[in-house]
Amino acid sequence: MDAIFNVIDIIVAIIGPLSDFLWEFPTNFEWYANIPVLGEFSFSTILLVGSGIYFTFRLKGIQVTLFQRGLRVMTKSYKTKYGISPLAAFLLSSGIRVGPGNILGVTGAIATGGPGALFWMWVSAFFGMATAYTESTLAQIFKERRGTEYVGGLPYYAKTLCHDRVWVGILAAGAYILYSVCGIPVDSFNTVTGIAAVGRLVTGVNFPVQSEFYYYASAFVVALVAFMAFGGVKRVTKACEFMVPIMACVYFATVIALVLYNADSVSYFFHAVFAGAFTPDAMFGGAFGVMLVQGVKRGLMSNEAGQGTITMAAGASDAKHPCEQGLIGAIGVFFDTHIICTLTGFIIIMAHRWTENFAAFQSEETYSKFLNSVSALTPGFMESIILLLISVCFALFAYTSVIGMVAFSEVSAKRISDHKWFIQLVRLMCVVVSAFGIMSSIAGYDLSRMWAFEDLGNITIVYVNILMLYLGFKYVIKATNHYKKKEKDTFSSMDVIGIDTPCWKNKE
């Protein structure tokens, strides 16, 4: 095991600086970093937010004007002959989108930039809804049918938009598989961490990482990942249909109960968020740029708008019109940031523990910041129950992220090859990296060092996907105009966007 860690350390020493350079460019140059406010923003962040603003104006604020129609589509009963329903696609994408980042990311953003960071998370997510609409619509337009399933997403529309160049689709598929391979270990261990927290609250025993409990919990998680991986996309979809509503409702109900119990602090929450958005708290450094960047970066990394990492769910849907799934993609960003992330924000801000002992608050590990904030808002006799519910949600958030990445890796792999042995190999790889990540952390290896790989996969996907969105945006505009004016008309790709696509040539 030590030999493997040594090899990883060598690779991280190369990958880490490269990943940091790509994400931070050109803030890593002094001449740019010295520019007020703008110098805080990397090109990748400007590209993501700027694209969201551009798509919002070109689509005439579609995330607002057609929001209610999107809700109707999502809740409408569907009989699907192929693929999955739009609602199932929403739940599948939420499985990976709603993850530990909704707790750890928000907590970290507020702890670094202050309460105002949450406001800028809302703003970036609002424009990100238009980006998510664009990529989800493209995923639908260029999806393909394989047997009884639809497959689509970045690897598929990238290939088509680049004049059917197979190598482009393979490159995009490989980028997503790399992203998954590097993300699965972290979220697998987060799942074990959540289970351990539940065990601690139930038994009163604080289990050490190297203990039988962790070994059994790890084996259980790996077995569950394997069960889902070798069951294919449909099994993962059914699991997400079951788990996502439960974990979202439990988390929502638990936090709302805490908000109501601490109703006298609600006014403080809104004042802290809106005042902090424009007059940063000096306690957090008082820098507007730091607070703004934290909100934008954490928001984008939570809802994944523009990364192309959840487009495979949109492509799997049997929507009646491509724009229907586009609207559901936009609602997914709203659900992730404006609802789930805001709930976490309520906890951290209403507890305002930094006003009591800022140094102690900053020194805590991120998840401890969150749990201690929950405890500060909870009546003593309910503390164990509330923490138990929160820990269950955290474990589910992490687990659905893992199986979502497994499912989307399979969809991406089918862009490379449909051979059964190849798909099985990708599934096995996901299970192996899940086990490796868990055992590495238990053995004492700092799992956060794996984030360098994940960051590199993220930035690769961002640059590939955003370019594809601009290449395909003209088709999104045409499809949107058709959807607005002729909602009940059949969408024919040749008639509406001027080209034939695999699943919309003669859509009935």
Image: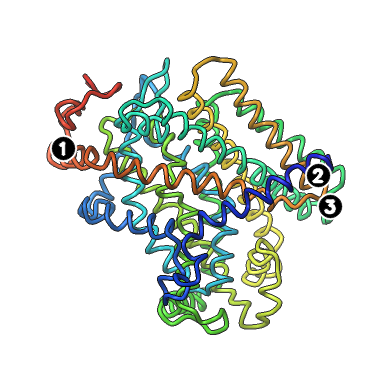
In the rendered image, which residue does mark 1 sit on? 482
Question: Which amino acid type is marked by label 1?
Answer: His
Closer to the N terminus: mark 3 or mark 2?
3
**Outermost residue, right side:** 211
> Residue placed farthest to the left in the image?
485
Q: Give the x, y percent position of residue 65.
A: 22, 53
Q: Nearer the viewer, residue 182 or 506?
A: 182
Lower sequence index among marks 2 and 1: 2
Residue beneath disc 2: 214
Q: Are marks 3 and 1 in contact (CB under 8 Å)?
A: no
- Decide which of 464, 111 is in the foreground and name it: 464
Could you say where residue 60 lies in the image, as x and y percent from the top left? 20, 54
In the rendered view, would you say 86 is above or below 451?
Answer: above
| Lateral position of residue 159 relative to residue 254, left or right | left
Residue at position x 54%, y 66% in the image: 109
Q: CA distance from mark 3 to mark 2?
A: 8 Å
Which residue position holds label 3?
207
Q: Quadrant of residue 381?
A: bottom right
Other residues around mark 1 within 10 Å, as few (<14) / some (14–19) / many (≥20): some
Pointer 3 and pointer 2: residues touching (CB < 8 Å)? Answer: yes
Is residue 325 visible in this depiction of the protein? yes
Q: Residues within 10 Å of mark 2 (few under 14, many from 20)?
A: many
Residue type, mark 2 in image: Tyr
Residue 197 sits above or below residue 474 on the image: below
SS category of the residue bearing label 3: loop
Distance of label 3 from label 1 (alpha carbons)? 59 Å
